[in-house]
Image: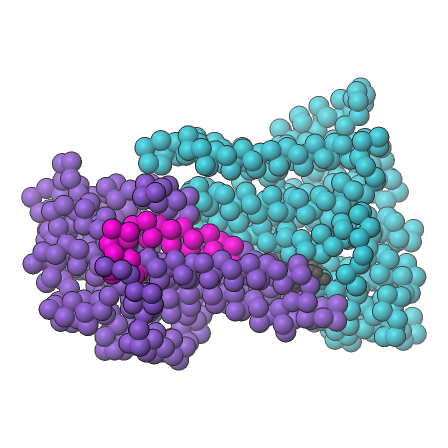
Chain colours: A cyan, B purple
Amino acid sequence: MAASETVEHKEFREYCRAWLQENRPAATVIPLPQAAYEVTHEDHKHYLVDWQAKCYEAGLIATDVDKIYGGHGHSGLQQIASSEVRRAKVPYFINWIGLGMAAPTLLAHGTESQKQTYLPPIFSAQEIWCQGFSEPGAGSDLVSLQTSAVKEGDNWIVNGSKVWTSLGQLAKWMLLLARTDKNDKYNGITYFVAPMDIPGVTVRPIHKMTGESGFNEVFLEDVVIPDHMRIDEVGAGWKVAMSTLTSERGAAAGVGAIASSESPYAAIETLIALAKEKQRNGRPIWDDPVWRDRLVKLYERIDAMSQNYRRAGVKELNGGAMRIPLQGKLNGSEIGQDLHQVALGMLGMEASLYVGDPNAIDDGRWALGYMNSYTGTISGGSSEIQRNILGERVLGMPKTK
Amino acid sequence: MPQPADFGFGEEQAMLKDSARRFMEDKQPLLALRKVIAGTEDPYFGKERPGSYDREAWKEMVALGWSALAVPEAAGGVGMNLVSAVAVAEEVGRAAMPTPLTSTLQTIFVLREAATAAAENWLQQISEGKSGTLALYGKDGSHELDQSDVTAVDGRLNGTSFYVQDLQKVDFLVVAAREGDTVKLYALELSAEGVQLDFDRIVDLTRDQGRVTFNNVAAECIAEDGAATLQAALPATLTLVAADMAGASEWLLQATAEYAQIRTQFDRPIGFFQAVKHPVVNMMILADQTRSLVYAAACAYDTAPATAHRAAHLAKSSASDTAEFCANRATQLHGGIGFTWEHDVQIYHKRLIHSQHLYGDGVWQREQASKYL
Ligand SMILES: Cc1cc2nc3c(=O)[nH]c(=O)nc-3n(C[C@H](O)[C@H](O)[C@H](O)COP(=O)(O)OP(=O)(O)OC[C@H]3O[C@@H](n4cnc5c(N)ncnc54)[C@H](O)[C@@H]3O)c2cc1C
């Protein structure tokens, strides 16, 4: 990233590259799901937990985190580690909510003891985390959430239900938002760490349109949470949640979360190679100007996204600290969706074939990936909500509400 | 002859369409489908998906005369035109009904265009309740009509047909086979000696598709100039799929418009927000364009064949793009719930992904239409 890479950076990059080369894990028997959002199977879980633990030990995760919290105590090296992990096309990290949301939230808002307790097993994937924000009645309008927490002595008694909880079926802990004051919409929400393996917590898997599972309904009935598992002040939950969401949308410096193995560059390069190889109507698809135009346009958008990230780091050129970072999730998810739509168009009749069909190109990954692309455009604040945020926060347009 | 302003859609067609709609609503095909596919959800860990469908409903449709709707009266059918068939196909799409009806209707028009005694015999069999489908594709899925991977020598077929629709539901096939430089059409029962069926695992839950391998199979030639016959019937082939897609797209439009009125966020029905309202309106605009082009294409085939190809390519082009947009927005605007297996939006979404590419997507259709401009 820096104008000239220091010797330390260069050495670390070379170390990461060599380590990843040597330690690339063998493929699983049944292919891994495309992203950590869809992991359900025990075998996959064990495999991915082992993999994350190894990468953590090797210093690719929590690279810049203080040693007292289980980190490796460097500074400015996480980005290098993460980019090398992406580049190596190795499996993703199963604890993406732990790494991508819980850890940054705890680092910013947790007590000393919370940080020391929860962070190390997040890094090593010994404890999986999930995010209990959304409810049946509170999706885009998260602040209208109804799950309640009532103080009883040193404990909180929680009642309500959460929905779309990714990894809920594997998680040991949940980032829980609950209402502690019915009369104050914004200041009536408190943020907790909720154990998933205690009485009163029921997890029910939901199937996605792909047929996969991976997200869940979570019912909370008289669940007892000790007060020391509250994060930040009573009533500060909304403020803390906003910082979690900023991390989720990729607009904050992370501790190494990587939820899917394939970079957009790798995806478009695979697709272009396919277009060059596949014959349609007596010539390669790549020779058809319509499809070539669409593919090159996608490449251009992916390049622009990557150069955006680069420019975001140049204060003199970035047009304001949040302008580019707040576009990241919107761009990434919509480009991913468009890329898969183009892929299906390119495949023609072969687009009908799904995972498990012997003739399906790349074992049906394009159809599967197309459907899973809606995870990106809906979750973590839909594209519509992202556009509201950009219009209001970056461009100063009037608030919808 | 000038084309009729009403597309040839008269009282008879209105009654037919109305009864088709009520019939399919009564059958609740998606509830039945969900029972059949329960437990098959997960693409890696789920059970194999059975290809079952409501055979009783099919018998009723045969009894109502729908499968033989477009079979000439001389061959024991109802003798109606493409507009009438399209009216029913649109309702099949709206209901996302698993049925061999659309394939059978397409087969009828190919047999009609073949206009041979052998073809007439197969039309007769449709009148008697048989269902059929077309086997035209080679492995690479090219939409050219002469790309079959099946060869014919002395009335014996060898090779494999790919992407055959409704293969688990139909009784007989019309197969395109290459013989030297020409393509001929053959017809045969699926139960014929030497026919091997393999079923694809496809995205679409409401239809099935498969491969048919011929091992020296004896079959009857129904058209010597197969390419010309397929080309003549192409407007019907395309328009029937497009009609099915128009029905399915309209269903998604209505479901999304309704959801936008009942789902409340920020103390408002989400349809209040223009980021929701406007795309739903755009779904309508596209769905209406498609529906108009579909009826225009059917009418052109019925009354002004010289314009039928251009009209049909435009109709299928529009249907493909409408389908892509409507499916995409319907899922997006339903939020999490529309992304679930439990919600019917996904069923329509996948049926439309399948249909979008069937017989050529928008890019392909526009390329073809350009030849008539
Ligand atoms: C695969 C997946 C995984 C998920 N994982 C998690 C998880 O782990 N934890 C968790 O807490 N949540 C999770 N979610 C939930 C996700 O955050 C919500 O689905 C999302 O916030 C949208 O809420 P909703 O589904 O209730 O849709 P709604 O809020 O009802 O939205 C429906 C539609 O209306 C639009 N809309 C709503 N309000 C406006 C407005 N003001 N202006 C314009 N358009 C608007 C939306 O953009 C959307 O298109 C997940 C969702 C998915 C799909």
Would you say the magenta stretch is mainly helix, strand or loop? helix
Horizontal relation, residue B203 to residue B62: left or right: right
x 86%, y 44%: residue: A69
Q: Which residues are magenta?
A: B298-326
x 76%, y 64%: residue: A142
Residue toward you, A115 or A250: A250
Q: Position of residue A116 (x, y in %)?
A: 87, 49
Horizontal relation, residue A338 to residue B141: left or right: right
Q: Position of residue A12 (x, y in %)?
A: 76, 26
Residue toward you, A323 or A225: A323
Horizontal relation, residue A215 to residue B291: left or right: right
Q: Position of residue A106 (x, y in %)?
A: 84, 51
Residue toward you, B104 or A77: B104
Q: Position of residue A71 (x, y in %)?
A: 82, 40
| In the depicted structure, whether residue B87 falls above or below residue B154 | below
x 25%, y 41%: residue: B147
Q: Quadrant of the N terminus of chain B?
A: bottom left
Q: How many marks?
A: 0
**Residue A32 visible within the image:** no
**Residue B279 visible within the image:** yes
Query: In the figure, residue B269 lies in which quadrant?
Result: bottom right
| Residue B304 drawn in magenta | yes
x 39%, y 44%: residue: B366
| Residue B107 drawn in magenta | no
Image quarter for ligand 1: bottom right
Farthest-out residue, front: B2
Q: Quadrant of the C terminus of chain B?
A: top left
| In the depicted structure, whether residue B30 falls above or below residue A57 | below
Residue toward you, A322 or B78: B78
